[in-house]
Structure formats: C-alpha cells, structure tokens
C-alpha cells in the first residue's frame, strides 16, 4: 500500500488535471451533468472571449480550476480547493454540491489502468528482480 500511496502522491498533478477536465466536460464526481449556462451567461462569456460551450464548466478566470489540489491523508485521496473566496465557494458548492471535487468512476478507471497499475507492476518487477 505504501508504494501505491507514493505513486498517487507523485501523480497528484495528473489527478488534479483529471478533475479539471471532468469539470470542463460539465460533470461532477458522480458523473452528474452540471447543466447548461443561461443564454445571458453564454452571451457574457462570448463577449469576454470565454465561450467554451453551453455546458456549465465552472471556469471564468480559471482561479477555481487552478486551486484544485489532491491531498493524501491516512491513505485516502481527497480533491479539494485552496481558493480563499468564500462567497464564490459558497455559491459553487451550494449550487453544484461537494461532488464537483473528485473523480468519477470513468476517470478513476482510466487513471488506475493507464498510470497506477503499470507503475505498481514496474515497482513490483524491480523489487523482485533485485
């Protein structure tokens, strides 16, 4: 288990990016679609040059996305935000819930198969072949 924790800690940036991409795809950790922007919001985003599509992505200036971090404590991975704007966070979590932070089952599987398992197998092979 220590080796898996070491690998996950090393891959923290990758895991954070998976969460960001998931939000950009308008989904939370349960795979729930976040909804669509109103026509007014779409017009404002277009005016600002930030129209990335009708699905809610929770990105405007990018501060919230940049604030997403992966932490491991007691062998449990948690995705959280370091954003200090409590009004913004209250609004976001109040509207979309805490599940906007975390990986959905599809992204968990992709990470496990593409990155975690190969690194664990490599580590085991290196340990056995010493």
Image (cartoon, helix red, strand yellow):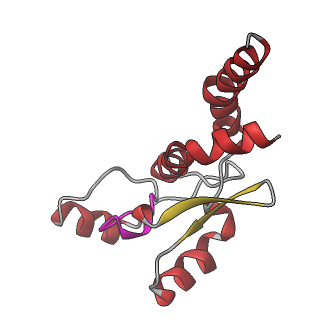
Mainly helix, strand or loop, the magenta region?
A: loop
Q: Quadrant of residue 110?
A: top right
Q: Nearer the viewer, residue 3 or 41?
A: 3
Residue 27 position (above or below residue 6): below
Within the magenta stretch, is there residue 23?
Answer: no
Q: Residue at x 54, y 59 (%)?
A: 35
Residue 43 horizontal/vertical position (percent): 25, 65
Relative horizontal placement of residue 95, taking residue 61 as reference (left or right): right
Q: Nearest the camera: 11 or 109? A: 11
Q: Which residues are magenta?
A: 57-64
Name the residue nearer the viewer: 61 or 121: 121
- Residue 18 falls left or right of residue 24: right
Task: State the residue at coordinates (54%, 75%).
Answer: 92
Which of the image's four quarters has the C terminus? Answer: top right
| Residue 25 drawn at (x, y percent) | 49, 46
Q: Residue furthest front?
A: 130
Q: Position of residue 103 (x, y in %)?
A: 65, 48
Write the residue at 67% across / 30% down.
Answer: 116
Image-based side of 88 in relation to 79, left or right: left
Quadrant position of the N terminus in the picture: top right
Q: Is residue 36 above or below residue 3?
A: below
**Residue 114, located in which quarter of the rendered image?**
top right
Q: Is residue 129 left or right of residue 60?
A: right
In the figure, 71 relative to 88: above or below? above
Residue at screen point 60% across, 67% down:
80
């Amino acid at each position: 288990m220590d080796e898996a924790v070491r690998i996950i800690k090393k891959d923290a940036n990758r895991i954070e990016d998976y969460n960001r991409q998931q939000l950009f795809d308008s989904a939370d950790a349960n795979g729930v679609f976040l909804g669509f922007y109103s026509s007014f919001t779409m017009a404002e985003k277009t005016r600002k040059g930030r129209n990335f599509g009708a699905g809610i992505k929770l990105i405007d200036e990018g501060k919230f996305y940049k604030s997403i971090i992966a932490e491991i404590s007691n062998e449990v991975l948690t995705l959280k935000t370091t954003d200090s704007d409590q009004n913004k966070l209250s609004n976001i979590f109040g509207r979309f819930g805490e599940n906007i932070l975390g990986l959905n089952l599809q992204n968990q599987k992709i990470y496990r198969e593409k990155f975690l398992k190969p690194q664990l197998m490599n580590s085991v092979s290196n340990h056995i072949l010493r």
